[in-house]
Amino acid sequence: MAIVSLSPGVAYVNGEWDKGSGHITTIINPATELPIGEVHESSVDDVNRAVDAAYRAFEDGRGVWPKMSPKERSAALHRFADAVAARREDLVFLLENEIGCAGMAGKVSQVEEAIRFAYFWADKAAELKFDDALPPTVGLTGMGQALVRKEPAGVVGAITPFNYPILLNMWKIGPILATGNTMVLKPSPYTPFSALILADAAAEAGIPPGVFNVVTGGIEEARALTEHPQVAVMSFTGSNTVGREVMRQAAGTLKRVVLELGGKSPNIVFADADIDNPMMLMSLVMGFTVHAGQGCVLQTRLLVERPVYDAVKERVSAAIQAIKVGDPADPESEMGPLINATQRDRVLGYIRSGLDEGANLVAGGGRPPHLDRGFFVEPTLFSDVTNDMRIAREEIFGPVGVMIPFEGPDEAIAIANDTPFGLGGSVWSGDSIKAFQVAGALRAGYIHVNGGDQSFGGPIGPAPFGGYKQSGIGREHGAAGADEYLEIKTMHYPVG
């Protein structure tokens, strides 16, 4: 299947495919290092045109999309979800060839979850309540009442990363459109087709022109979107470094930001946990190897209580050495490559850092000897790690797990919270009361207790997802996620 059959490789602006005025970029398959297609990059002028189209679709005559009833928007989003679901095979093709994600867990978390979220927000669009009349009260001028109305914010700019683009694009599209906003999506320059195929689905579904726009490009195009005065909200998923830049750029127009950033999440195992529980072993292993460790919410710090430390180390080491690393197009492959050579070399640099700082290399540590091309790194496990080492403090974004011993709940909590991040975590214990107490003490936004939601398919639709500290601002999913894209208006009036 040629990638050109999935998308013309150009931007989608105001309901039309638009070549734009930028240069042509070749997209590389990270497993084979061979080209899979070309994209006409958007320019800053193209981004401005896309924002203008979204602004006109929202503002002109109050816009068709925001004026629709919730049920009308729901019907349109159901058509969109149907069109996305009809592209399931094409999405899997992109998953393997553009993103480089292997294994059933990748297909579930990237493709099936994206489709599920499309339908979730199509349903949610019909259920959203925008008006709430508060009980009458007596004020200085007599009896009065207030109507609290939620209104769409306007044009939303969305920037998504390369690691889970199919899913994360849908995380943005769903709530933004369900709440009546219009949007401009700029995907990672490494994975543009995963966004353009969704534009094709939107066109087929009859989403009105200007409501959903996709532009391509790099840093300058992202800046143009973030700084544009007609963009009301910026929603960004990616690294902390870029997240800080998004905040700085958005500050010029005091626009709101929703940031889902990095993590260094702990997976905490107490001695009273069942260390032979296959669910727990899956959590420990996939917590740093699924999609080659390229996930912000992955649990790459394995905090294990000393009495079971060696036993857990043996089990995790054996499991990761059994993982078949290879081309995602091979159905037997369980872990694919990193996105590019730069990321591969960065991860190998962190592995060298771990060795230099005195950590013990248990397994992995290099490039797979049986693969002579592709941006692969072996699943790697370090033990005897202390929480002050770089490999324990910095987000590696590769298949590297670090094992840190602890003694008792207090030390586990202290180590887990000793990080600038606060995105997720897991707690495993035979004592459910202790497990929930520890989970409650973690300064993080999304916690699994004894295997809750270990599908690796992302958060449950209605449950808010987001981070504490430097892991983000705001929440995605459910009512909390919808509210990020709504303004609140209060109207007072007399009664009686």
Image: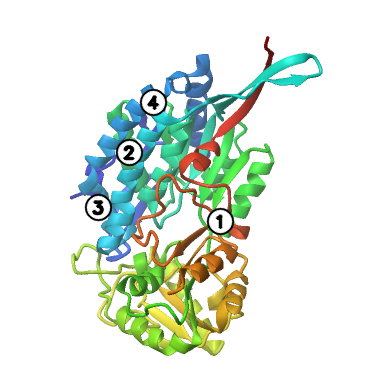
User: Between marks 3 and 2, how big is the CA–CA gap?
Assistant: 18 Å
Which amino acid lies under the numbered mark 3 shown in the image of this protein?
Val
Q: Are marks 3 and 4 in contact (CB under 8 Å)?
A: no
Q: Quadrant of residue 314?
A: bottom left
Which amino acid lies under the numbered mark 2 shown in the image of this protein?
Tyr
Is 145 displayed left or right of 185 in the figure?
A: right
Is label 3 or label 1 in front? Answer: 1
User: Between marks 3 and 4, how big is the CA–CA gap?
Assistant: 28 Å
Which amino acid lies under the numbered mark 1 shown in the image of this protein?
Gly
Q: Can the viewer see residue 106 in this picture?
A: yes
Q: Are marks 4 and 2 in contact (CB under 8 Å)?
A: no
Q: Are marks 1 and 4 in contact (CB under 8 Å)?
A: no
**Circle nearer the N terminus (1, 4):** 4
> Of residues 6 and 410, which is closer to you in this image?
410
Task: Estimate how packed mark 1 is, as few (under 14), some (14 to 19) or many (20 or more) residues with alpha carbons within 10 Å.
Answer: many
> Of residues 216 and 318, which is closer to you in this image?
318
Mark seen at residue 92: 3
Residue 303 coordinates in the image, percent (x, y): 50, 78
Is label 3 or label 2 in front? Answer: 2
